[in-house]
Image (tube, helix red, strand yellow):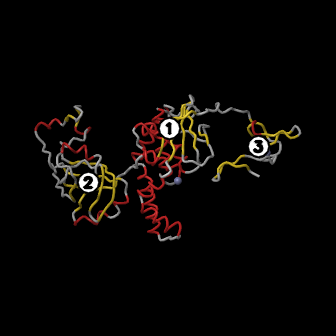
Amino acid sequence: MIMYQLKPVGVVRNQIKHPDDVQRLKHSESVVDVFDDYSTGLFMTETFDYLDILFNFHLSQITSAADDWMVTTRSGEKKGVFASRSPLRPNLIGVTTVKVIERNGNRLKVSGLDAVDGTPVLDIKACDTSVFEDVEMKKYHTTVMKNNPRVSIRKSIIAEDTEKLLLEAGKMHGHYCPGLAMGVMAATRAMQELDAESDGLEDLLAIVETNNCLADGVQFVTGCSFGNNSLIFHDVGKTAITLTKRSGKGFRVVSRPDSQAYIRQSFPEFDNYYEEVVARKNRDPEIVAAYRKSGVKRSFGTLKLDFDRLFDTMWVEVEVPEYAPSHDDEICHKCGESVMASRVVNTDGNIECLSCSDTEISVLDGHGIHHSA
Ligand SMILES: [Zn+2]
Ligand SMILES: [Zn+2]
């Protein structure tokens, strides 16, 4: 039989000394200290979100009891060793996909590494995430088959995982900002208070009192949107939302007058970069990058601030509108385009759309709701 020899390339450093505590490590940080001989191999590792760390279960010893290669898991279940993450393995090799936090020289800071302090590291590899994307895709199809595209959002709301919700809401909003974070926080709280789920059928309604970043966080978390007629806009310029079911018993969340100051004080470095980049138009790539980074830090940091210092909450009575009417379409005789019957004018027996008939229309844009000339 060919035998192999392995040389450690580094060592794990963290607070966990005993293997029984490794579950704690799933949620904490470790440093992988890479030996000088291999330090150049770390170049660019910090650009990855995930890495695979291979290590040696140096505290485990294969005994005759392990000869049948069956293990008992923490939950008491019997499994084959290859179906488990047991440290009692033929070659005592552990492998864990970790989240990369940062690299300082030959010290790689990661989270999720379930190896105790002093564990010899055998290898570090770029993680191939394409297989996870397939899994995600499969999950996606299962969800759609169950006809509830919001399963994962619902789970995050129940778990109050506002970080995940913000991460996702950013896909819609295009950037991360405290306004979006506040929208996510306010909407998550309101959804919890109402024990609500959104079916996109106007049984849950959200009223937003401003058309700024907050509104996108609210649309994402509540599922009440412009497109499914469940988003109501009161153009009053307040950072506030009300969520209600059709009973009209609504939960209102409004930002406190000093909430902006509270956010600014909590993340002061952002203002300095803002001043430099936005006010003084400094385009030094390092400064711009630092500005963006501090913005993201402030947005996600906002989630961790004291909810009750950011918002006031109250139960309110809401006048719930009738379900949106459905109309047949008519054809404009001028442009030939089909148009909702509720939006046509009849000029001398001819059907015209509002655009062709030069009628004043309501417009919602960055200035709020107004009428076109
Ligand atoms: Zn924004
Ligand atoms: Zn027309």
On the picture, is 294 further left or further right than 9?
Answer: right
Residue depicted at x 49% and y 64%: 274
Residue depicted at x 35% and y 60%: 46
Mark 3 vs ligand 2: CB under 8 Å? yes
Q: Secondary structure at mark 2?
A: strand
User: Cα distance, mark 2 to mark 3?
Assistant: 62 Å
Q: Secondary structure at mark 3?
A: loop
Q: Is residue 348 above or below residue 171?
A: above
The amino acid on which the numbered mark 3 sits, given as a three-letter code, is: Glu
Q: Quadrant of residue 84?
A: top left
Tag 1–tag 2 contact (CB < 8 Å) = no
Residue 298 in picture, x, y percent from top left: 43, 56
Q: Secondary structure at mark 1?
A: strand
**Picture disc at residue 337:** 3
Tag 3–tag 1 contact (CB < 8 Å) = no
Per the image, the residue denoted by label 1 is 314
Question: Depth check: 168 or 209 in front?
Answer: 209
The amino acid on which the numbered mark 2 sits, given as a three-letter code, is: Ser
Nearer to us of marks 3 and 1 is: 1
The amino acid on which the numbered mark 1 sits, given as a three-letter code, is: Met
Question: Depth check: 38 or 64 in front?
Answer: 38
Residue depicted at x 48% and y 52%: 258
Per the image, the residue denoted by label 2 is 30
Residue depicted at x 77% and y 37%: 330
